[in-house]
Image (cartoon, rainbow, N blue to C red):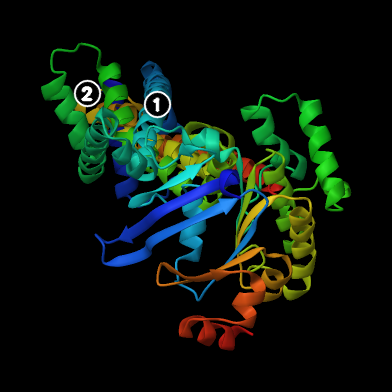
């Protein structure tokens, strides 16, 4: 720890003496925070975990979202028909619809960090796989938002399209797959990618349950070097870079989709 | 005439808000093969609801619709099979914007009737020829004029070889100069012997093409007769005052 202390003392002195941060000082800080004892490895590990959590949480979120949106949209569009037909169909669908509504309300009505802690410390307290718990927490959280994105995309298609499909003899599912979903997809995809971007940033609270994500990695370095500037700026820049790449991707895709729209 | 009834409507009712709004208040009528029934009436009279009920796009509160001898209002009936035999044309065309004209026309025959692409395309091109739009086969709906869209919508429905064609105010969303081209297609269809039910504000069409005119108001059939008698010798006061306003 001695060289660290020495470096900090030197930097502190130079700052107190009102000297501006020279290139030399920055280099010193850089070496202290990232090169010494290979501290950059924290960032690599953290970034890896952040990407891992985000990727699998998105996959889980989309899977949950599709199921929930299907139940909700089917209930909205077909409840009258099912009610007429009688039997268990309507009963089962309305129960599932109720469950989906509660799920969306609870997930969207509570902070994700609270959900993460409840899952980690209560529901899955016995689990030893921290990353899996994080994937589940963020995936379940994202699912509620994805469900509403998909449902809004379906609802945005004029009901006349639905009626036209049905009047030709297409059933509910065929009308959805051949006519509604292909059109709704154009509205859904950009919103879905934006949700992916938001989720990436939201995973920064994973440190609350001791997971070494990118934010926690930067914070860990800060904790041992007593130097905030370099590690925090570094993680901010890494997030920014990833988000900018993804944003660029969204706008390219949006443009492509609009080009097909004739 | 008795045995060639295609659609038999019996005591059809459609209530909203637990019966506070009576869109249809007991409609009973038979539609025979080859008939061109034109439904007229003031807005809110239930004529569109009546037409849409025939295709079960509106689910009736009570009453029966017998189509081809089958009660299609029975929840156990597979309505999708019967809708194939009923062509529907909407006020706002409702072409599928993500498909070309040809794809719009061949989607249902290919997916539902399991026709090959060649069969379906051939049939579609023949029909496009009849409405003078062969050169638009590969266009997307957004590249078409309103009149063209509606003509495509008509032939799209015809691709399923329906037994009856239902028209829900087919010219109401069109610019005036495009109404003629759509009505011409409908006239040709009627002349070819197609059974048609048409909700429209085009009194000229009703008079010229209709074999029977139904006048509806407040969810009921007030009067029905041949066009000559409906327009020449209206009986009820409501029909008289309606005709005074529209003619």
Q: Secondary structure at mark 2?
A: loop
Q: Nearer the viewer, residue A190 or B201?
A: B201
How crowded pointer 1 is (Cα within 10 Å; few <14, some 14-19, many 20+) is rated as some
Position in image of residue B239 (x %, y %): 51, 81
Q: Is residue A22 visible?
A: no
B229 up-or-down from B247: above or below: above
Question: Residue visible at 38% across and 38% down?
Answer: B74
Residue B81, quarter of picture: top right
Are the residues flagged by discs 2 and 1 in contact, CB closer than 8 Å?
no
Q: Secondary structure at mark 1?
A: helix
Badge nearest the viewer, 2 or 1: 1
Give the quadrant of the N terminus of chain A.
top left
The number of numbered badges drawn on the structure is 2
Q: Is residue A68 visible?
A: yes
Mark linked to residue A63: 1
Residue B92, quarter of picture: bottom right
Question: Residue visible at 75% across and 24% down?
Answer: B116
Q: Nearer the viewer, residue A31 or B106?
A: B106
Sequence order check: which comes first, mark 2 or mark 1? Answer: 1
Question: Residue visible at 41% across and 52% down?
Answer: B10
Q: Nearer the viewer, residue A38 or A26?
A: A38
A155 up-or-down from B233: above or below: above
């Amino acid at each position: 720890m001695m060289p660290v202390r020495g470096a900090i003392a030197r930097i502190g002195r130079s700052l107190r003496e009102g000297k501006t941060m020279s290139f030399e000082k920055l280099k010193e800080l850089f070496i202290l925070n990232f090169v010494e004892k290979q501290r950059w490895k924290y960032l690599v590990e953290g970034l890896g975990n952040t990407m891992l959590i985000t990727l699998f949480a998105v996959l889980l979120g989309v899977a949950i979202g599709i199921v929930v949106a299907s139940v909700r949209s089917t209930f909205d569009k077909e409840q009258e028909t099912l009610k007429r037909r009688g039997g268990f169909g309507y009963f089962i669908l309305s129960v599932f619809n109720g469950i989906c509504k509660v799920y969306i309300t609870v997930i969207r009505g509570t902070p994700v960090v609270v959900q993460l802690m409840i899952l980690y410390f209560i529901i899955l307290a016995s689990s030893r796989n921290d990353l899996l718990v994080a994937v589940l927490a963020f995936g379940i959280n994202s699912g509620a938002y994805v469900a509403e994105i998909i449902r809004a995309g379906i609802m945005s298609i004029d009901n006349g399209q639905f009626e036209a499909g049905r009047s030709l003899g297409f059933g509910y599912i065929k009308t959805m797959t051949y006519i509604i979903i292909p059109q709704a997809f154009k509205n859904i995809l950009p919103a879905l990618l934006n949700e992916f971007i938001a989720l990436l940033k939201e995973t920064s609270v994973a440190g609350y349950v001791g997971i070494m994500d990118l934010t926690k990695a930067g914070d860990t370095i800060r904790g041992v070097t007593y130097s905030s500037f370099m590690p925090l700026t570094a993680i901010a820049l890494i997030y920014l870079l990833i988000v900018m790449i993804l944003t660029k991707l969204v706008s390219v895709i949006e443009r492509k989709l609009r080009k097909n729209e004739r | 005439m008795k045995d060639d009834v295609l659609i038999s409507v019996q005591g059809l009712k459609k209530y909203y808000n637990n019966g506070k709004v009576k869109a249809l208040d007991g409609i009973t009528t038979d539609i025979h093969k080859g008939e061109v029934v034109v439904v007229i009436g003031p807005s809110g009279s239930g004529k569109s609801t009546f037409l849409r009920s025939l295709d079960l796009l509106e689910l009736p509160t009570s009453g029966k619709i017998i189509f081809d001898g089958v009660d299609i209002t029975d929840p156990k009936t597979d309505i999708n099979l019967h809708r194939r035999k009923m062509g529907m044309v909407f006020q706002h065309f409702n072409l599928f914007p993500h498909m070309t004209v040809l794809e719009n026309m061949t989607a249902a025959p290919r997916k539902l009737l399991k026709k090959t692409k060649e069969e379906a395309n051939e049939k579609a091109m023949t029909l496009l020829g009849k409405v003078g739009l062969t050169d638009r086969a590969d266009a997307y709906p957004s590249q078409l004029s309103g009149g063209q869209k509606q003509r495509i919508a008509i032939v799209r429905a015809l691709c399923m070889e329906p037994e009856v064609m239902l028209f829900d105010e087919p010219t109401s969303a069109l610019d005036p100069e495009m109404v003629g081209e759509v009505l011409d297609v409908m006239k040709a269809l009627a002349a070819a012997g197609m059974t048609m039910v048409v909700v429209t504000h085009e009194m000229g069409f009703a008079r010229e093409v209709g074999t029977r005119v139904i006048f509806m108001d407040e969810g009921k059939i007030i009067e029905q007769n041949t066009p000559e008698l409906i327009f020449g010798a209206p009986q009820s006061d409501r029909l008289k005052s309606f005709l005074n306003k529209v003619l």
